[in-house]
Amino acid sequence: MRARVAVLVGGKGRGSNMANLVRAGREGLMPAEVVLVLSPAEGTPAVDAAFELGVPVRILPKEDVSTFILENLYKFEVEWLCLAGYLQLLPPEVVHALSGRLLNIHPALLPKFGGKGMYGVHVHKAVLAAGETESGCTVHLVTEVYDEGEVVLQKRCPVLAADTPETLAARVLALEHEAYPEALALLVERAARVP
Ligand code: GRF
């Protein structure tokens, strides 16, 4: 039985992790399939990409986000929610309802370079400013606190002397596309073993 997954993208979402998870499911690289995309905004590259991939999209309302999310997860029979670029904290009702089945991906090696304001290019700028020789990405379970929760999987890459935030971001993004399907597969398989 393949796990049914929704992906919640960001408001300015590029959607590359979402599209990658859709492909990974369709190509059988993980025992899961993306059946729903949630987005806080219409007309973003992520929403366009979801339409092109033929995945149903629902746009979050401005109010009562938790009822909307939980109703749609129920309607689409979704048990797992993957955040991919979504920057807000989710309401506690959603976090609790999905406990252990709510994931996020972060473009650094948590617990370093996480927390509020640490997103996108800000993360890579901070990594370079700190003189790190290594960076990477982290897939973790989501709690009510930014970038906390059990680390499911990390992948590492070198930081090169000539790196700019953009070159480092590209290297980390390639790792993200390996890490997210692998992490989801690990968790789905782990859940299947628990009676
Ligand atoms: C990724 O770098 C991810 O780590 C972070 O937001 C970005 C989303 O990129 N949480 P994309 O929209 O999936 O391309």
Image: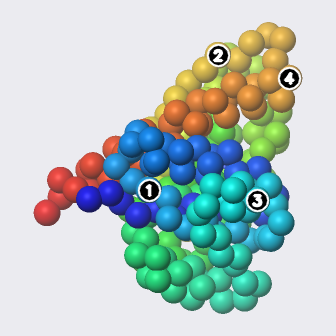
Residue at 54%, 51% (x, y): give it.
22
- Name the front one of labels 3 and 2: 3
Mark 1 / mark 3, whichever is N-terminal? 1
Label pair 3/4, CB-CB below 8 angstroms: no
Is 93 placed above or below 9 here?
below
Is 145 placed above or below 159 here?
below
Point out which mark residue 159 bears: none
Q: CA distance from mark 1 to mark 4?
A: 35 Å
Q: Which residue is mark 1?
A: 33
- Name the front one of labels 2 and 1: 1
Q: Which residue is mark 4?
A: 164
Residue 186, x across and y down, in percent: 34, 44
Q: Is mark 2 within 8 Å of ligand 1?
A: no
Label pair 1/4, CB-CB below 8 angstroms: no
Structural crowding at the residue carrying mark 4, measured as other residues with C-alpha within 10 Å and reported as few (<14), some (14–19) or many (≥20): some
Question: What SS does tag 4 mark?
Answer: loop
Q: Quadrant of residue 131?
A: top right
Q: Which residue is mark 2?
A: 158
Q: CA distance from mark 3 to mark 2?
A: 33 Å
Q: CA distance from mark 2 to mark 1?
A: 32 Å
Residue 195, x across and y down, in percent: 14, 63
- Report the amino acid beneath label 4: Thr
Mark 1 / mark 4, whichever is N-terminal? 1
Q: Quadrant of the N terminus?
A: bottom left
Label pair 1/3, CB-CB below 8 angstroms: no
Q: CA distance from mark 3 to mark 4?
A: 29 Å
Mark 2 / mark 1, whichever is N-terminal? 1
Residue at 80%, 23% (x, y): give it.
167
Point out which mark residue 48 bears: 3
Mark 2 / mark 4, whichever is N-terminal? 2
- Report the amino acid beneath label 2: Pro
